[in-house]
Image (cartoon, rainbow, N blue to C red):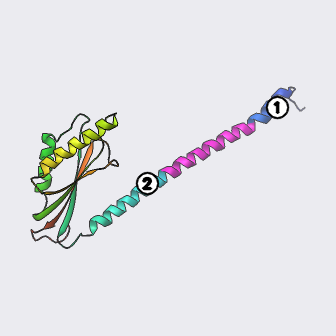
């Protein structure tokens, strides 16, 4: 004996719900595929940047030139270099090969302050504070405001010529 469902409403409900459920499943599958592709492309970009950095660091600027960089982070309230920053900067410059001439570039990021004017003012204060500290190492200092850096950070780039008798980039 074959049992049939007597309700046409039940049949109509089944007729419309099966495609709907299948569509939801395919939508989730599509979303999952998109997230995997985004993660994969992000990883490819990170790998490419790492390869570029490796190639750049492997190539000497010239036979006796070197380049180094130091990153510093500030708290949101800090507008000047603190004693720990001074100590790290001193250790950084003492670790460099002896040089007749240093070129220094100070890159400062925006602060995490909410107001745009305060952000710019905080960054300027940090730039000036770093410049005052670094003037003892070189007169050739370039100041750069760099919005691409992470909030409340600064990077010190140093290019020098090695007179200590070392070979190429250290």
As drawn, the label of residue 84 is none
* Above or below: residue 76 compared with residue 34: above
Picture quarter containing residue 27? top right
Picture coordinates of residue 140 (x, y %)? 16, 58
Q: Which residue is drawn at the image coordinates 21% and 59% (left, top)? A: 68
Residue 59 in magenta? no
Query: SS for tag 1?
Result: helix
Give the CA separation, mark 1 to mark 2.
Answer: 47 Å
Outermost residue, right side: 1
Q: Are marks 1 and 2 in contact (CB under 8 Å)?
A: no
| Vertical arrangement, residue 11 with respect to residue 33, above or below | above
Specify start and end residues of the magenta stretch as a single range.
18-38
In this view of the protein, which residue sits in the foreground, 83 or 122? Answer: 122
| Main secondary structure along the magenta-highlighted residues | helix
Q: Position of residue 66 (x, y in %)?
A: 19, 65
Q: Is residue 114 left or right of residue 30?
A: left
11 relative to 86, above or below: above
| Earlier sequence position, callout 1 versus callout 2 | 1
User: Which one is nearer the viewer's eye here, 46 or 24?
Assistant: 46
Q: Is residue 143 left or right of residue 164?
A: right
Count of numbered labels shown in the rendering: 2
Q: Residue furthest front?
A: 117
Q: Is residue 170 visible?
A: no
Which label belongs to residue 43? Answer: 2
Magenta stretch: residue 34 in it?
A: yes
Residue pointed to by mark 1 = 12
Classify residue 168 by image quadrant. bottom left
Q: Residues within 10 Å of mark 2 (few under 14, many from 20)?
A: few
**Residue at the image position 13 percent from the left and 59 percent from the top:** 96
């Amino acid at each position: 004996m074959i049992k049939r469902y007597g309700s046409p409403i039940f049949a109509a409900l089944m007729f419309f719900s099966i495609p709907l459920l299948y569509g939801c499943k395919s939508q989730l599958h599509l979303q999952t595929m998109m997230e995997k592709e985004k993660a994969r492309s992000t990883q490819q970009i990170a790998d490419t940047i790492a390869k570029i950095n490796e190639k750049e660091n492997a190539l000497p600027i010239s036979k006796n030139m070197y380049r180094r960089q130091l990153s510093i982070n500030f708290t949101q309230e800090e507008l000047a270099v603190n004693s720990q920053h001074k100590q790290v900067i001193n250790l950084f410059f003492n670790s460099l090969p002896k040089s007749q001439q240093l070129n220094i570039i100070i890159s400062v990021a925006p602060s995490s302050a909410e107001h745009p004017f305060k952000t710019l003012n905080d960054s300027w204060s940090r730039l000036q504070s770093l410049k005052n500290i670094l003037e003892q190492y070189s007169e050739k200092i370039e100041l750069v405001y760099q919005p691409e850096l992470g909030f409340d950070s600064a990077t010190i780039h140093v290019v020098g010529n090695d007179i200590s008798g070392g070979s190429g980039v250290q």
